[in-house]
Structures are given as C-alpha cells and as structure tokens.
Image (cartoon, rainbow, N blue to C red):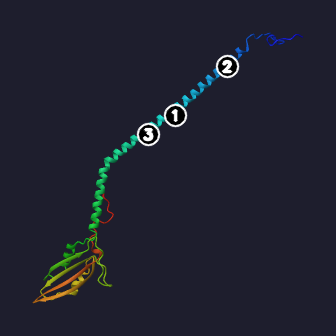
Amino acid sequence: MSKRTERDAVVIGGEPRVNLLPPEVALRKKARSARRGLVALVIIVLLAVAGGYGVATVRALAAEAELAVSQARTAELLAEQLQYGEVTTVSGNVQAVKDARTVAVSTEVLWNEYYTKIRDLIPVDTTISSFVVDGRAPWEPDNVPAGPLRQPRVATITFVIASAGPFPVQPFVAQISKIPGFVDVTADVITKDGESYTTQFTYNLGADALSGRFPAGEEASN
C-alpha cells in the first residue's frame, strides 16, 4: 500500500474532500471566532452594568423624591409651629401668672368678713375701738403655737371693745368661738377709765380661715 499524505487523505464511504488551505487560515478563523465571542461577552457585561446603573438611578431618584416630600412636610410643620408659637407663649405666661397668684394668696384671710362677724356679735351699746390683724406672708414659716395645748394658727386678730360698763366676756367668747376658722381667744386686758371700760381680745385663726381662692393646680384655660 502506498503512503498518502494528510492532504491526500480520503474517507472511506464518504465524499472525498481535500483541504488545500494552509493551517494559518484555520487559526485565523478560530481567532476571529474568539474575538467575536469576546466582543459579545463585553457587550453583555456593558448591558448588565447599564441595567444596574439604570436601576440604581431610578432608586436614587425615588429616594430624592421621598426626601423632598419629607422636607416639605417638615417645613409645613415648622410653619404651623411658628404660627401657634405666640399662642403657646401667651398661654404659658397666663399659667405663670396664675401660679404666682396662687402662691400670693395662699395665706390670705378675708379680714373684712371677720371684722363684720365680730362686730355683729357685740352688744348694741359697745363699739370696736381698735382692730389689728396679723397674718403670715407666703414666704414666712408657719406660726408656732404659744404652748403645747394651743392649736396651730395662721393669723391673729387683736381688737379692743369699748363699753359703758363691764363687758360680758364669757357670753361673747362663746359666740365668737363659733365663727369658722376659730382656734382660740383670750381676754388679755380690761381697763376702766371712769365709767367706761375697754376690753382687749386676742383672737387666733386656724387654716380654715384661709380664703382658699385660686387653688393650686388651676389650669390656664380656666
């Protein structure tokens, strides 16, 4: 059997073919195919990157839109707060004034009412020649009872009754002890000047004598 070169090779039972092209041509074809595949891969990568960038851009725009809405709402709320800020300040000032008023009158006694009640209990032929009151200021400490058997007091009234004859002390004390706020009373000095008499009383008042106006905790809206 004679030798055949690769160029003269034939396939038994098939169509005889002969590749007359040099190997470099086949290599160039393979190189072109590889380049086309690489170009296609680069295009796919670029498309993927462009798609990701597009998605990121859309999300960024959506976030910016949400931020703009939030900023607009914040600005609206600040404008409303400024609108009602003056009202809040005025309301706070009113409450501060009411709190100060409550403290100022916390030791208040309606002296005129006590003067009237005592005056209405004295006999018709007598007069109140002196009426001196002594109360405690809100910033002062509580009054200490004069003795262990004396009740706490918040105020004292010292008054003098002038009469043409001896003054009926016991019946009068029994009557004024029924006045609300009463703690105790003493007849301190009885003076006789000719046919006239003067009787000095010390009348102590307890916490029930306080007026109780403008109680603590009163709201500014009241």
Please give the label number shown on residue 67: 3
Please give the label number shown on residue 31: 2
Q: Nearer the viewer, residue 95 or 44?
A: 44
C-alpha distance separating marks 2 and 1? 37 Å
Badge 2 marks a residue whose secondary structure is: helix
Above or below, 206 relative to 17: below
Please give the label number shown on residue 209: none
Which corner quadrant of the image does residue 27 belong to? Answer: top right
Q: Position of residue 110 (x, y in %)?
A: 23, 71
Is disc 2 in contact with disc 3, using a CB cutoff of under 8 Å? no
Kindly tell me whether residue 122 is visible in this rendering. no
Q: Position of residue 79 (x, y in %)?
A: 34, 44
C-alpha distance separating marks 1 and 3? 16 Å
Q: Which label sits in the foreground, 1 or 3?
A: 1
Q: Which label sits in the foreground, 2 or 1?
A: 2
Q: Position of 37 compared to 10: left or right?
A: left
Badge 1 marks a residue whose secondary structure is: helix
Q: Which label sits in the foreground, 2 or 3?
A: 2
Q: Position of 82 compared to 133: left or right?
A: right
Q: Which one is earlier in the sequence, the residue at label 2 or at label 1? A: 2
C-alpha distance separating marks 2 and 3? 53 Å
Q: Amino acid at mark 3?
A: Leu
Q: Residue furthest right?
A: 1
Which corner quadrant of the image does residue 144 belong to? Answer: bottom left
Q: Which one is earlier in the sequence, the residue at label 1 or at label 3? A: 1
Question: Which image quadrant: the C terminus?
Answer: bottom left
Q: Amino acid at mark 1?
A: Ala
Q: Which residue does the image show at 30% across and 55% down from the upper left?
A: 91
